[in-house]
Amino acid sequence: MTDTAVDVTVTVQFLARYAELIGTDSTQVTLRAPATVSDVLGAVRSRFPGARRLPDRPLCALNLGQVDLGTEVAEGDELALLPPVAGG
Amino acid sequence: MTDTAVDVTVTVQFLARYAELIGTDSTQVTLRAPATVSDVLGAVRSRFPGARRLPDRPLCALNLGQVDLGTEVAEGDELALLPPVAGG
Amino acid sequence: MTSHFLTERPIDVERLIERVVSDARGGVAVFLGTVRNHHAGREVERLEYSAYSPMAEAECARIAAEAERTWGCAVALEHRVGALGIGDVSVAVAAAAPHRDEAFAACRYVIDEMKRRVPVWKREYYTDGTVAWVDPTAPGGVHLSEGTPDAVDF
Amino acid sequence: MTSHFLTERPIDVERLIERVVSDARGGVAVFLGTVRNHHAGREVERLEYSAYSPMAEAECARIAAEAERTWGCAVALEHRVGALGIGDVSVAVAAAAPHRDEAFAACRYVIDEMKRRVPVWKREYYTDGTVAWVDPTAPGGVHLSEGTPDAVDF
């Protein structure tokens, strides 16, 4: 953490069917701060062709709590993209 | 069953606390036909001192089905006097 | 059919559930009543359930059939009679349906109707030596038996 | 606390019930979800549940705490993950309270909230060889996997 550390690196988890669509379980995305969940999604869409099949507004959890797309991400955060749940 | 058989004999069951009040589990009551559940109750009250502690209108089952006090009884019927139920 | 719904032996909850589950009925709602350690302000040591057995069996069969017809489900139920200790299961109901709405509704109906209609009675033995017949309609909820302290209502 | 609510092993319903019953809590409501043999017009052969485990654990803990706080009851719940066959218990909830109103309400709340909030997913394998992700929001309720017949929606 220095004065020049203006990038944030976020781990992105693709769960269940989304892992199938994307072709991997997780990836790391580095963005110039400040960045939001929506910015991370944009980076994912540009990196993985399968990501075009994600919904426009997928369910997102940041560090295990549900968030909306405008939430700001921080260094080391874990962002999970969750298909509609189907437990029980 | 002859033309002179104008009496009906009913078995009366005293359940749970009522057996304790009356001092016995069951008795037989013979009445001149036609007779009702209420008539059987009257005979019980006059025979057993403990029956004065029965409620005025106890829950009654005739041959396993709930009945009211005006129901007519027939030869061989089983009338059960039931305290308020307390199962579960 | 006698002794189908009333049992003097411990209720086997797993077996009750197995009787209603099927490959097409994925939702199972179960209710268990167990013996509590307090009632009517006294500490319960043990209790005894008695029943007017033939009528209780018939009433349980009617209640189960009503629930099965109303909610298209499968129902199993048992009520224990005889001597029970604290924590013992006194009544168990299982209702299985394709979906949980029906399973919950049927299970709830059965336990409510059982408590209202099945001729079963409970005699409680308290740790202070008193004994009472439980009567939900009586003041205080019980009739204390004669010869026990505070037997004012018997 | 990890692996407290999710389990890869068969759910032990009796043990779940034992965890909530107490001498003062005489009413226990239980819900079991079991694997059905049909879904989305197809015959199910088996299925696999997967979870976003750390979040699922946290969400289950939150739901249980909400129910315990609201109804003054004790709650236990488990969700199975991994491979399941027809009839296997996939989810189990037990809620114990002094009286049945609270037990039923808490049990119902927990299963409803689990189905809404806990990140668990179901992959169904059908007897016709097709495979699908279950998605209650999708037309038909599933996304058929690529390479399987009628895989129009994947």
Image: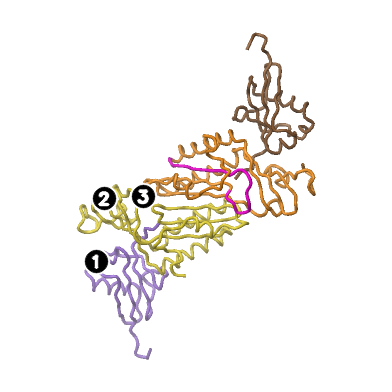
Chain colours: A purple, B brown, C orange, D yellow
Q: Is residue C79 part of the magenta span, yes or no? A: yes
Q: Element under label 3?
A: loop
How many other residues sit within 10 Å of disc 2, few (<14), some (14-19) or many (≥20)?
Answer: some
Amino acid type at mark 2: Thr
Q: CA distance from mark 1 to mark 3?
A: 33 Å
Q: Secondary structure at mark 2?
A: loop
| Residue that sits furthest to the front in the current view | C9
Q: CA distance from mark 2 to mark 3?
A: 13 Å
In magenta, the rendered stretch is C72-89
- Residue furthest out toward the bottom: A3
Q: Are marks 2 and 3 in contact (CB under 8 Å)?
A: no
- Residue type pointed to by label 3: Arg
The residue that mark 2 highlights is: D127
What secondary structure predominates along the stretch shown in magenta?
A: strand
C24 vs B35: above or below: below
Pinpoint residue C123: horizontal percent, then vertical percent.
68, 45
Residue nearest the viewer, comparing C84 with D108: C84
Q: Amino acid at mark 1?
A: Arg
Label 3 marks which chain's residue? D
- State the image coordinates of residue B32 (x, y, percent, origin top left): 71, 16
Residue receiving disc 3? D36
Q: Position of residue C130 (x, y in %)?
A: 75, 49
Q: Which residue shows up at 78% across the image and 47% down it? A: C148
Q: Residues within 10 Å of mark 1 (few under 14, many from 20)?
A: few
Magenta run includes residue D150: no
| Location of the C terminus of chain B (image quadrant) | top right
Sequence-wise, which precedes: disc 2 or disc 3? 3
1 vs 3, front mark: 3
Q: Residue at x 29, y 70 (%)?
A: A25
Is circle 2 on the same chain as circle 3?
A: yes
Instruction: Give the labeled residue for mark 1.
Output: A52
